[in-house]
Image (tube, coloured by chain):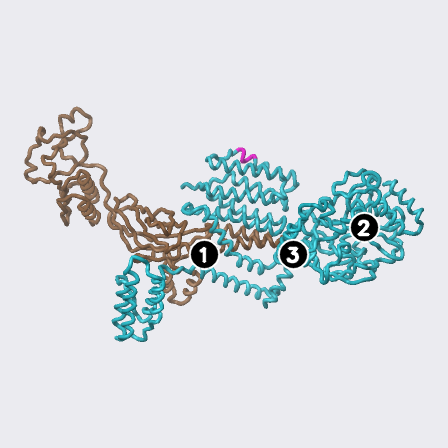
Chain colours: A brown, B cyan
């Protein structure tokens, strides 16, 4: 295969043709729609380091057998040599015809590993001892058995929110003896969504109320008081419980219970001051998640759009997606 | 990363190493083999329980091993010390095997050590054992692959087994075509192995081990019928010098009399037998030949006493053709010097035997043959016993044997007889060789084993020349008339049972074929084989071309196998795909949203009415076969559909 690849290199415009017919020569090859079948044009084989060591030992055995004029040893050497050389076909056959049908995934927060569910099919043959690897990622071993239908789980590290292009995946095998490595690159044209990461801690959101009303309303300690907690940067100064703070080393703020528990939260991009864009997204993400966990309704106001008020997984996903895709 | 090999890997590796040590056991000392196997078992148990071997003990063993080998063999190199060291190191490697890397290293080393077991013998059974031992070695590599736990142990053994089977043609081709070395690259191969068979010295009592060795010495194919057992004396060496204990082919440190180029004159007095001998490697110069050979074969020479020898040692299977005459006269004239040589006796040994011989001479006078008869009568009537386990002899071996122990085998009789003859003034010598043999009726050849080794005498009688006298026959006639097996073991030996003998004959035929086809395949045979295929062995380009061409053919076969896919789906799907391929040639491609029948209907719209009707029918029937019933369609219906689909050959497209 590599031989024919090199032959087509000779004409002047050979390189383009070469890459057209042997796309996997390029590591960062063009992405392609799924499903992808690994055919002979895209499978490459080279001996491994161990394979080279084995070849040297075979050579030593050959010279020994010839030197001692020992035909039984020579026959054994040729048999072992032929067997190990034939294992090349085994490696090739292990990859050939393997199909990557689809990739299933669940969004994760940036910084976590996103788990790709690779739906692979082995056209009836068991394929043992495969592994998948990508340039930034880890190596995952797997086998494709004819009777098993589970996806191959492959974890990919994420760094930033937004759409993540699935990188080129290197699927390789050293089956059966580890003497040859057959590999193929697959670059699926697919993207997965990475949610923004939520900030660790910060102030609670305000409930949706009329802003004017809210501003004039005095903070009634007896009505809404629900407890005290340590001051966190960003808490409004008027919430600080000065009397209690005086007795402690750290200032504390009053926790207020909303008068109507069902009243939706308003998570407003413009209501957050003093933070840069990414920090705002992180805070809004935390609020969205907290609201979801608390089973509350919430409304997300972003510069370009407003979502809700609503609740439930679909709303959560819509909000997180909108946050993830903010420019 | 957890790189610790799995238990299955370690089990297979231990099995490989254990088999390797066992295959080397026949030529290793027991005090090395047994501790190595024990150490292996201990380590296997330790690995199961996640115990690592104590580091200090490991180091101590690593130092002890070469010391032991040097202490016993005196050196680290050469086949015997080398194999002892290799086996030891292999087991020691297992002690420190904690990671996949170590396993790979151990397997590579085990493969090498396995091969070296064949340097000690190339028998068919040993080769098969070594090949079988490759299976766990390769299975270890399979089990080392990630994901191998997804399959059963049986399958990880089957994978290498299939690959080994599939590699046989490749291996045979390489075996035939790999050029053989005309001379070794280093060392004198096999200088340290024991020679086998008859040797050119004889101390009564020392071929006893040979007499119980059942391995083949040589095989003889006669052109005509096989001569009777009593005529089957194969001479290999004559011994003329006696130092009181040992007979030598030549006096030590003197010119080899047996290698004097000119052989004694032979007068043929009867029929001439042609035959071919295939001699197993002996690492000696001696070649057995049926009494009495006429002419030396190519590459061989006659000694003075008409024994055959080869200037190059017989390091591998050797074939030679001879013709012999069982009725002959040899060396009617004996020079004075020769007479002196064949009358030599050491001074100060065996006074009683000398006195006995002297008394015979005085009684018989010049009638030499009467003296011979006297001696044979002594053996026959003197209470002598044939045994392979004779009591030990003192300083005067001949006296002790003749007058004291009176028990022994051919060497004792030949030695004492020759001594008596010389003491009586008759020139005499010892002849070493083989006698008898087993005729394999199936293979139509004579198998002579090492246990057929025999020693007899020749006396020179004036006017007659050298005459063969076998004193053993006087004591134990069955040794000659029935063969060594019966004489040595008694007539009711278990292995003389007819069906077992028949089985042994069959097995020997296989061994003979192996010896001739594989072991005896040398540079000469390679040359003639290549020539018969039109390849000029002298022209390396021609050899390289044929080697390349055959490898290309086999590589192509392998490629075809690896590209070959069994067609997917059932017969109906395959038949449908055939039809779809034909339609594609017309320019119709089924798009991914179309079901099979819809595609055919769409194509039908573009065809002329008869063809369209045909196709629409196919489409309808396909739907019926596929979807009409829960049960699978009958194979007859599918065959009919397939037949009709094949009949459909659209001529052109109507636009």
Q: Magenta segment range?
A: B56-60
Vertical position of residue B322 compared to residue A164: above or below = below
Residue A208 visible to an observer of this rendering: yes
- Residue that numbered label 2 is attached to: B470
Foreground tag (1 vs 2): 2
Q: Is A79 a magenta residue?
A: no
Q: Badge 3: few (under 14), some or many (20 or more) residues near its Cα, within 10 Å? A: few
Secondary structure under tag 1 reads helix
Label ID, residue B183: 3
Residue A89 circle label: 1
Q: Residues within 10 Å of mark 1 (few under 14, many from 20)?
A: many
Are tags 2 and 3 found on a single chain?
A: yes
Q: Is residue B641 left or right of residue B416?
A: left
> Residue B185, can we see it?
no
Tell me: residue A203, above or below residue B563.
Answer: above
- Residue drawn at x 53%, y 63% is B550
Q: Position of residue B133 (x, y in %)?
A: 54, 47
- Magenta segment main secondary structure: helix
Q: Nearer the viewer, mark 1 or mark 3?
A: 1
Image quarter where the N terminus of chain B lies is: top left
x and y percent of residue A166 in the render?
30, 52
Decide which of A34, B564 is in the foreground and name it. B564
């Amino acid at each position: 295969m590599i031989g024919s690849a090199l032959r087509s290199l000779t004409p002047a415009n050979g390189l383009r043709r070469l890459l057209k017919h042997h796309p996997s020569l390029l590591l960062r090859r063009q992405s392609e729609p799924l499903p992808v079948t690994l055919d002979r044009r895209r499978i490459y084989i080279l001996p491994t380091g161990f394979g080279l060591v084995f070849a040297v030992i075979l050579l030593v055995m050959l010279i020994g057998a010839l030197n001692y004029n020992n035909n039984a040893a020579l026959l054994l050497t040729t048999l072992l040599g032929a067997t190990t050389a034939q294992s090349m076909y085994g490696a090739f056959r292990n990859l050939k015809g393997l199909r990557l049908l689809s990739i299933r995934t669940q969004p994760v927060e940036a910084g976590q590993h996103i788990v790709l569910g690779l739906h692979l099919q082995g056209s009836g043959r068991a394929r043992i001892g495969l592994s998948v690897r990508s340039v930034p990622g880890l190596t995952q071993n797997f086998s494709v058995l004819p009777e098993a239908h589970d996806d191959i789980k492959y974890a990919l590290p994420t760094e930033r929110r937004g759409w993540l292009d699935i990188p080129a995946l290197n699927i390789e095998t050293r089956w059966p003896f580890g003497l040859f490595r057959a590999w193929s690159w697959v670059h699926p044209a697919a993207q997965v969504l990475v949610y923004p990461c939520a900030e660790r801690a910060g102030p609670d959101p305000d409930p949706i109320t009329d802003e004017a009303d809210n501003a004039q309303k005095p903070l009634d300690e007896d009505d809404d008081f629900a407890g005290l907690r340590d001051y966190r940067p960003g808490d409004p100064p008027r919430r600080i419980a000065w009397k209690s703070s005086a007795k402690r080393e750290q200032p504390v703020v009053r926790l207020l219970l909303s008068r109507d528990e069902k009243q939706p939260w308003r998570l407003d991009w413009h209501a957050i001051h003093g933070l840069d864009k990414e920090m705002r997204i992180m805070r809004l993400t935390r609020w969205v998640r907290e609201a979801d966990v608390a089973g509350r309704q919430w409304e997300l106001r972003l510069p370009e759009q407003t979502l809700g008020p609503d609740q439930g997984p679909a709303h959560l996903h819509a909000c997180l997606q909108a946050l993830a895709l903010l420019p | 990363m957890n790189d610790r090999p799995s238990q299955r890997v370690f089990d297979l590796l231990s099995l490989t190493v254990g088999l390797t040590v066992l295959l080397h056991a026949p030529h290793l000392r027991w005090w090395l083999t047994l501790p190595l196997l024990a150490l292996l078992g201990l380590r296997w148990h330790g690995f199961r329980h996640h115990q690592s071997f104590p580091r200090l003990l490991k180091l101590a063993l690593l130092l002890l091993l070469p010391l032991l080998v040097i202490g016993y063999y005196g050196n680290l190199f050469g086949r015997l010390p080398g194999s002892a060291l290799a086996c030891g190191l292999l087991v020691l490697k297992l002690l420190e095997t904690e990671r996949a890397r170590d396993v790979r290293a151990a397997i590579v080393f085990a493969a090498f050590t396995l091969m070296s077991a064949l340097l000690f013998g190339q028998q068919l059974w040993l080769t098969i054992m070594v090949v079988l031992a490759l299976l766990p070695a390769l299975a270890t590599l399979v089990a080392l692959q990630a994901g191998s736990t997804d399959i059963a142990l049986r399958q990880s053994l089957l994978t290498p087994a299939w690959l080994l089977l599939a590699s046989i043609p490749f291996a045979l081709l390489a075996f035939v075509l790999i050029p053989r070395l005309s001379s070794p690259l280093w060392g004198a191969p096999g200088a340290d192995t024991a020679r086998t068979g008859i040797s050119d010295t004889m101390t009564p009592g020392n071929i006893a081990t040979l007499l119980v060795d059942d391995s083949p010495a040589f095989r003889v194919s006669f052109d005509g019928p096989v001569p009777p057992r009593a005529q089957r004396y194969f001479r290999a060496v004559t011994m003329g010098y006696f130092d009181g204990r040992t007979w030598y082919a030549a006096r030590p440190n003197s010119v080899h009399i047996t290698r004097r180029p000119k052989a004694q004159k032979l007068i043929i007095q009867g029929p001439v037998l042609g035959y071919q001998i295939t001699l197993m490697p002996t690492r000696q110069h001696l070649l057995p030949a049926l009494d009495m050979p006429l002419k030396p074969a190519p590459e061989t020479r006659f000694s003075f006493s008409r024994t055959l020898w080869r200037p190059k040692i017989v390091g591998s299977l050797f074939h030679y053709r001879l013709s012999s005459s069982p009725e002959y006269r040899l060396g009617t004239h004996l020079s004075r010097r020769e007479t002196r040589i064949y009358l030599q006796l050491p001074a100060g040994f065996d006074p009683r035997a000398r006195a006995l011989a002297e008394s015979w001479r005085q009684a018989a006078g010049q009638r030499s043959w009467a003296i011979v008869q006297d001696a044979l009568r002594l053996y026959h009537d003197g209470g002598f016993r044939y045994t392979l386990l004779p009591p030990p002899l003192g300083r005067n071996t001949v006296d002790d044997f003749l007058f004291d122990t009176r028990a022994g085998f051919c060497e004792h009789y030949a030695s004492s007889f020759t001594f008596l003859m010389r003491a009586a003034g008759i020139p005499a010598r010892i002849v070493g060789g083989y006698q008898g043999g087993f005729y394999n009726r199936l293979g139509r050849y004579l198998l002579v084993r090492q246990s057929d080794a025999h020693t007899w005498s020749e006396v020179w009688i004036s006017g007659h020349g050298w005459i063969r006298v076998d004193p053993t026959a006087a004591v134990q006639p069955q040794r000659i008339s029935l063969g060594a097996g019966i004489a040595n073991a008694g007539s009711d030996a278990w292995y003389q049972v007819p069906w077992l003998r028949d089985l042994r004959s069959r097995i020997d035929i296989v061994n003979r074929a192996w010896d001739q086809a594989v072991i005896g395949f040398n540079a000469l045979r390679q040359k003639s084989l290549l020539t018969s295929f039109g390849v000029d062995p002298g022209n390396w380009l021609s050899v390289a071309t044929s080697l390349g061409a055959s490898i290309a053919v086999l590589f192509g076969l392998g490629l075809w196998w690896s590209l070959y896919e069994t067609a997917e789906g059932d017969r109906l799907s395959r038949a449908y795909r055939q039809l779809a391929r034909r339609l594609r040639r017309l320019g119709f491609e089924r798009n991914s949203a179309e079901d099979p029948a819809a595609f055919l209907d769409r194509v039908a719209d573009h065809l002329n009415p008869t063809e369209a009707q045909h196709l629409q029918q196919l489409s309808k029937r396909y739907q019926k076969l596929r979807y009409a019933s829960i049960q699978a369609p009958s194979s007859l219906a599918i065959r009919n559909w397939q037949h009709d689909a094949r009949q459909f050959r659209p001529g052109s497209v109507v636009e």
